[in-house]
Amino acid sequence: MANLESKSAGRAEAARLLSGIRALVRRFSVSERADVACCGMTVAQSATLEALRAGGMRIVELGRRLGVSPSTLSRNLDRLEERGLVARRADERDARAYVVALTKAGRAAAARVAAGEVDFAAEILGRLPAAERRDVVEALESLLGAVRGATEDCCPGAFDHLMTDFPARRPSRDAAEEETQP
């Protein structure tokens, strides 16, 4: 009976976690749409610039990283290219493939969007008591490490490009002991 109650409590906490994450995702999505609209681009265009900040890449890899179809990516790149934010060139190793990279203007636009996102995050942290800020950020990092670990269980490597700052974390000894106790 106690084990059933524990599982029920765990599911209730999991539901609260899911609800909180959904609220955060929605709120940050709204904020992101507003931020990039101020920069005169769509969220998809902003995500493309963000993905290319690390350097140029083959169009196939960029599409995989963004999770979009080739036709959607092509239209997106056409618009970014028209604005002078990206440039496509033939891949030196494979004449059938193309590499896309940010231009100087594209790097500046990506930096403006990224700075706006950091400013918004700083505003959020500024609304928390100073004594709690570090704990909140560390708890979020821990949560994201757990998310990465769970993701690796079902889809190894699929989201590595999204989780580069959050290594998978092993459960703490206390958590492992709780799982093995009746």
Image: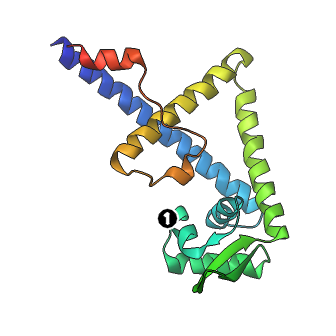
Q: Quadrant of residue 105?
A: bottom right
**Residue located 59% across and 51% down the image:** 29
Q: How is the image coloured?
A: rainbow
Going by the numbered disc 1, the residue's amino acid type is: Gly
Q: Is residue 156 above or below residue 74?
A: above
Q: Position of residue 44 (x, y in %)?
A: 61, 65
Q: Nearer the viewer, residue 15 or 98?
A: 98
Q: Is residue 16 left or right of residue 56?
A: left
Q: For the residue labelled by badge 1, is the local secondary structure a helix, a strand or a loop?
A: loop
Q: Quadrant of residue 146?
A: top left
Tell me the quadrant of the picture where the N terminus can be found.
Answer: top left
**Residue located 42% across and 38% down the image:** 149
Q: Is residue 93 above or below residue 5?
A: below
Q: Position of residue 24 (x, y in %)?
A: 55, 40
Q: Is residue 50 left or right of residue 107?
A: left
Q: Position of residue 41 (x, y in %)?
A: 71, 67
Q: Is residue 38 left or right of residue 168?
A: right
Residue placed under numbered mark 1 in the picture = 67
Q: Position of residue 97 (x, y in %)?
A: 58, 83
**Residue located 20% across and 16% down the image:** 3
